[in-house]
Image (cartoon, coloured by chain):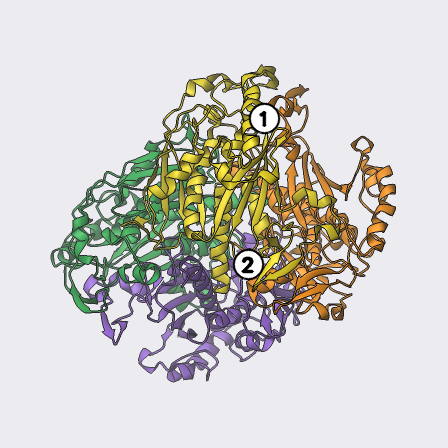
Chain colours: A yellow, B orange, C purple, D green
Amino acid sequence: MSHNTFGHLFRFTTWGESHGPAIGCVIDGCPPGIDLSETDIQPFMDARKPGTSRFVTQRKEPDQVKILSGVFEGQTTGTPISLLIENKDQRSKDYSEIKNRYRPGHADFTYDAKYGIRDYRGGGRSSARETANRVAAGAVARKILGADVRIKGAVVQIGSSMINGDNWDWDTVCQNPFWCPDAQAAKDWESYLDSFRKSGNSVGAIVEVHAKGVPAGWGAPVYGKLDSEIANGLMSINAAKGVEIGAGFASASYSGVENADEIRMDGNKPVFLTNNAGGILGGISNGDTIIARLAIKPTSSILTEVRSINSKGEEIDVRTKGRHDPCVGIRAVPVAEAMLACVLADQKLRHRGQTGR
Amino acid sequence: MSHNTFGHLFRFTTWGESHGPAIGCVIDGCPPGIDLSETDIQPFMDARKPGTSRFVTQRKEPDQVKILSGVFEGQTTGTPISLLIENKDQRSKDYSEIKNRYRPGHADFTYDAKYGIRDYRGGGRSSARETANRVAAGAVARKILGADVRIKGAVVQIGSSMINGDNWDWDTVCQNPFWCPDAQAAKDWESYLDSFRKSGNSVGAIVEVHAKGVPAGWGAPVYGKLDSEIANGLMSINAAKGVEIGAGFASASYSGVENADEIRMDGNKPVFLTNNAGGILGGISNGDTIIARLAIKPTSSILTEVRSINSKGEEIDVRTKGRHDPCVGIRAVPVAEAMLACVLADQKLRHRGQTGR
Amino acid sequence: MSHNTFGHLFRFTTWGESHGPAIGCVIDGCPPGIDLSETDIQPFMDARKPGTSRFVTQRKEPDQVKILSGVFEGQTTGTPISLLIENKDQRSKDYSEIKNRYRPGHADFTYDAKYGIRDYRGGGRSSARETANRVAAGAVARKILGADVRIKGAVVQIGSSMINGDNWDWDTVCQNPFWCPDAQAAKDWESYLDSFRKSGNSVGAIVEVHAKGVPAGWGAPVYGKLDSEIANGLMSINAAKGVEIGAGFASASYSGVENADEIRMDGNKPVFLTNNAGGILGGISNGDTIIARLAIKPTSSILTEVRSINSKGEEIDVRTKGRHDPCVGIRAVPVAEAMLACVLADQKLRHRGQTGR
Amino acid sequence: MSHNTFGHLFRFTTWGESHGPAIGCVIDGCPPGIDLSETDIQPFMDARKPGTSRFVTQRKEPDQVKILSGVFEGQTTGTPISLLIENKDQRSKDYSEIKNRYRPGHADFTYDAKYGIRDYRGGGRSSARETANRVAAGAVARKILGADVRIKGAVVQIGSSMINGDNWDWDTVCQNPFWCPDAQAAKDWESYLDSFRKSGNSVGAIVEVHAKGVPAGWGAPVYGKLDSEIANGLMSINAAKGVEIGAGFASASYSGVENADEIRMDGNKPVFLTNNAGGILGGISNGDTIIARLAIKPTSSILTEVRSINSKGEEIDVRTKGRHDPCVGIRAVPVAEAMLACVLADQKLRHRGQTGR
């Protein structure tokens, strides 16, 4: 029922605003006896943190995670793990001029409509800075899943430029500033994205995340479906506008014969011939790779002037200064991986709880 | 935490299998003092029920809802509303041959993997018959929302055939067996769908649902976002493979300038110029029409033989006899409307709870 | 968040009013593969059902449970188990005169204050008839717990008459109409209770429930404590006014030395020398017998006239006719056992989920 | 489902161990626009903090609360309120000798049984230090309840010494180190408690909490009853062994006539003549003062040697050194008040959500 909590048996609650002293999250339900320290979490934080290339926001945040509870002598104790990340590079004055102005595409207007008050500095609670907490929780979730479950994400489209799937190489993903699995596309994207950036514009993207090694049987009917919870988790990421599983929207144009995910045996293991299902049938994992895609809209904070209103209901024009991502889809990759990890960790524990397996 | 419950303050729990004596749902948290009888619910049931045209399954189910509790002298009492729908037209013997065979694209394999047991008759718990309950709950949710919130859905694509958006006419939706808002497309779809049906094949579809009249302010950060919960609810519908809000996946290819949902005033009411946002900003409604789309894969039960395995892990071929929808996307329309209504009713009550408004 | 649901991983939702067509419950989260039929549940229903002696209400309800879902070929499938109990012996006219009158000690006034409407027939939703559902759910919970966990309850006090603990004999409990473990007290209670019954009065009672064989480790800090959840569950029983664990209120008058639950070893098993702790330390089971006691107030429905008000706020006098238990504490025994079973089954699954043990 | 979260619409999640760097809590669901600063919270913290008299532990903790989020320009924003309390006076070496020894009456044994690991320093997560968070959350809950709802607690019994109810004076409660409402009893308790303290012993207590000004209508059937949730909340307090509402266990010995809470009118307000109901009927508030009592066992940490076992299952003797409360019941008063406030704030919001009132 909480508005700021995600998950059930494995669950995390996040708090904090973009320009407060810190942000953080509390993870509850982590199994005991798992080796865990800040160094397990930090690499994932570093993958998401701002300022790593010219294609992301230039805000400088070290995003150092501190573990405040729930770990004793290097192991989880089964009690809540409190994680704290200090905000270091706030420039609140950047935001004074949006205090009473609603940036189109932002939550400024809706927070005021809902609460009658908002911390306008940097978007306050609606800032994508909140996603640092998810990445931290995701690092813990990966520990619960163990080495057999491997979760990786990539950007497969920026604006109108798609990767060539035939070039997909997971090793390439870490070798460019876009998490792009296609070396050629990554090269093209440099100038493509620069053009948006330099013109005070921004652009959308599509992120794809995979989870390999998930055993068949995780998930649950009917309102605890693995795909519903993935949709829920991914759609909760800032700027997300769409989620699809496996063949996704393309399956709408398929016939039943085309879409059929036929099954053969590879030794004693079932093999699905198309994985149009994206590894999920009836809300339950089938043992194949889980595949989800996430549409991220272009950053709404742009230097180009757009029409809007202020809090008095007067028509105004808004140019959003500050340090913004020209394509927020890029930094969504580690976040989407983290959300997938959290959904899976939770479903693993729930499956074990109900079935004992 | 329940796997068969949806919602928080307004919540429903469903039970029942395709070929058991009945299915049903229990609605908890309904406000008191609302006029409610079976006649408020039945029209929505009739919209979803099978056997209404040659384009849907020929199973004959009257889907008569009985209210067993929670209503007294024609009004809701605030206590649980138990709804019961008897199963009338089971033909369990149709299913004896899939007892030990896994139909590709179905939950047969995954239920066995999860539970080690399944009611194989008609898909058991994984049958789309479960969605009758959602429609019943949705009818109650509409009562909570009141007449100002109007929820309608339509099929906008079947297979590769899309409607022409310029022809959109809500009145047309009820005048064809496809819930199609474009009279021309509806006409085309008759022969198009017949071709799939007659060849023992099936086809996918895209459903679009709108909610007009939702006030600004419903929804919540960060894991209670209105769009996350809509994604969760729609993705939980049988055969769903993708969900998008507003411009959805298209927004990935937009620039920030193109995607900007600029705001002007119409009297004292803000007007959003593109509604690329689909009526939701930062997880909270902005007062514009809420728009969501849902991709439904083609029915997996087809007469065409496909390759699969049985429960012993032997390779087999499967032809699925029985009475199946050639395009399950059609009957998904009332279900998608219902899920949207349920999400909104729940968010309305939660918003009122937290803010007093 | 649901107001009519109990539990987390193992959870049940109840519905129904005293004088509607039926009552029922939906159990979610039951592990698959458990042998279950109506005959596993019925004996517990029979233990609670009315009309079994002159010391309980004379309403005649067979309380036959029907399983509508979740069981296939004699085994649970892991999907929701819907249980239905028809109401057979309603005499709604008995209640017409309390339609606008608030019986002191009843929920008549508070339901009206909360909802502005109530089903006044037989107390509607607030009737103890609802507890039949708990007993049914408890029977399923016992199946989850298995034969090693043995849950039994007894009445240890009626009015001012306490049992002599030295006479405690579990076999005696089923051999008298009071669930009394002390044969001498049971004999005394016949005339004692008759005196209340015949004078149009009623009397309170204390129920004690034991769970033997619970392994050490179930429960959780800090808001998922086993004792908190037992308190929650027992206090939710109609007419409950107090709950205590182990030494309970008596421990307030003890010194630390007196209260100490010292530990010795019996082979390789720890033995607690006093069980003042009631089998729970820090909210987690210690392997000793779990002991809880529940205070049940006297039936508020009495033939003796008492002062009250009506729904217009006028002062009136009320005599409650109808068929009421002279001591509702008696029929609370199977209900208290059931709630303890449900708490333990849920904690067992949650423990297994988090720790894998 | 969370083990470390309390409440539903108004909910808080706590984290932290006795000897970690800090403890804290995250409050979710607080209404927006409430004036809130650390100075609203601190007085309640000071009431609970250790070291204020010789009758409580001599650990020196300033228990200064810091608000890290959810408040902007002095007002709540409706987003999560993160509260942090640093641990200042840890003496972890005090605990090295209990590392492998189980103190009777403590959670040492059960945490090891559950998790296979525990932070043994100061009891770790099971320490009563966790209750500082509850007091902080309770201060926020009081703000939600507003000035009309007044929550106060008192110690009514220490060991075998009860107060004389005729002497009850709320002003006296703050004028002695025991929160005792009876000046004479407070005087007696000084030497009475000294005798336990000096002999290396401890003693139990009974705490009573009142909530005046709660309107009729808060609470809910059947598993959301106000009394069940109070029982849940109070029983979750460290060392609690019993909870009762209104006449509580005494009602078991009453007849229906004696127990009847007759109703008369005082102007247009119903008046309950005995308040044996403790302000709650059918799980819903009736407008009268809500009264709950809580039995607190004697501190288990005593200097007197008691028999126990170590983690190898060997029999040992344990004397618990360190700085312990001779009567933990005293410091339970502000905690019990806080839990009552939190239950009421949550029920207020839930009632408003469902009914709009």
> Mark 1: few, some, or many residues within 10 Å (few <14, many ≥20)?
many
Q: Place residue A206 in its image quadrant.
A: top right
Labels 2 and 1 share a subunit: yes
Residue position for label 2: A216
Do we see residue D217 in this rendering?
no
What secondary structure is found at the residue carrying circle 2? Answer: loop
Is residue C313 shown above or below D203? above
Q: Position of residue D197 (x, y in %)?
A: 15, 55
Answer with mark 2 or mark 1, whichever residue precedes in sequence: 1
Residue position for label 1: A203
Q: Chain of mark 1?
A: A
Q: Which residue is at a point 88% across and 42% down the rendered structure image?
A: B187
Query: What type is the residue that disc 2 sits on?
Result: Ala
Do we see residue B119 in this rendering?
yes
Q: Is residue A348 left or right of residue D65?
A: right
Q: Position of residue C51 (x, y in %)?
A: 57, 77
Q: Position of residue A150 (x, y in %)?
A: 48, 48
